[in-house]
Structure formats: structure tokens, C-alpha cells
Amino acid sequence: MTREEEIKTLQSLKGNTYFGQIFDNDTIDRMCDNIKNDFMIGLGVDVFAKAEQVRKAEHNIELQEKIIENHRVTIANLKDQKDNLVALIFKAMYTDAKNETIESELHEILGMKETCVYKLRIGATLSDTERAAMIYELTSKK
């Protein structure tokens, strides 16, 4: 292939082409000048600059998609938790559910630690199981 053919080929790759997605018009022009002057094609050209920009953009898109999916999961979990808590409130208000049953369900919905924190905030007494769990929680962190 002659220099002229290489230059013509490079010029034809400008714009909305796969090649053009990686190399902007100025970079292609610089490559053509290098060919005209019988220099190495990459002289003075950062051939990887745009490729790195594209890679970073793709990575950012992937991160954004992960964040959006995490938010969807979190929102779904919060809705489920709200539904479970509302059901528990109605069960406590309108059935013969025992306190142990209600507390057991709170432990499942909120977790033992959070249930204990809320009970302590309102001045309620912790059950023996809850006290043991909190003692274990405090002593296992060392």
C-alpha cells in the first residue's frame, strides 16, 4: 500500500466509524502527517488517550448500573420490611398474639440488635435471650 493509499484510508475512517470512536479527527490528521513526512505513524499521537476515555466511560456506566440496581434492591427490601412491620402491628392489635411471638417476628424483621436498641430507647425490659445476645455482641467485638 502506498502512502497516498494509507492516508486516503485513514481519512475515510474519520467520523462515525468504529475507528473514529477511538481516534478523533485531529489524531487521524496527525497520523496522516506522520505518513506524509515518513515518520512513525504514532509519533506525537497518544493513540490510547481516547481508548482510555472510552474504557473509563464504560466503567462509569457499569458502576452507575450497579448503584441503580442496589437502590432497587434496597427499596424493595424497605418495602418488604414496611409490609412486614405493618402486618405485625395489625397482628399485635387484632389477634391474640403473645408478646414472645411479636418479639420473635421483630427479631426476624429488624434483627436482634435493632430490636434491643428500640426497646432500650423506650425503656422496655430486654428478655433473657436479648440480654444474652447483647452481651455476646459487646464481648465478641474485642
Image: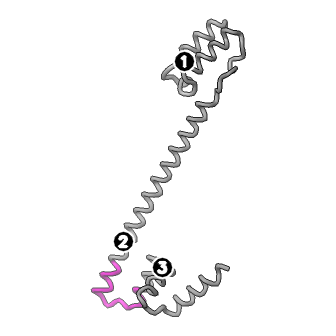
Find residue 13 and name its label.
1
Q: Please check the rendered image and state whether residue 59 is part of the magenta-colored stretch, yes or no.
A: no
Q: Is residue 23 above or below residue 78?
A: above
- Element under disc 3: helix
Of residues 111 and 48, the one drawn nearer to the viewer in this rendering: 48
Residue behind mark 3: 114
Pick the front one: 123 or 104: 123
Name which residue lies at 40% across and 71% down: 81
Q: Residue at x 49, y 78 (%)?
A: 111
The kind of secondary structure element at disc 1 is loop
Numbered range of the magenta stretch? 87-102
Amino acid carrying mark 3 in the image: Glu
Verify whether residue 98 appears in magenta: yes
Say what secondary structure mark 2 lies in.
helix
- Say few, some or many: other residues with alpha carbon within 10 Å of mark 3 (under 14 / 14 to 19 / 20 or more): few
Q: Marks 1 and 2, how far apart in space?
A: 57 Å
The C terminus lies in quadrant: bottom right
Question: Could you say which disc has been placed on residue 82 in the image?
Answer: 2
Marks 2 and 3, how far apart at CA: 15 Å
Looking at the picture, does residue 55 appear above or below residue 116?
Answer: above
Instruction: From the top left corner, tell me how far across and down residue 121 is, in percent.
Output: 44, 85
Residue type highlighted by circle 2: Lys
> Picture quarter containing residue 30?
top right
Decide which of tag 1 and tag 3 comes sooner along the chain.
Answer: 1
Q: What's the magenta bit mostly, secondary-structure-wise?
A: helix
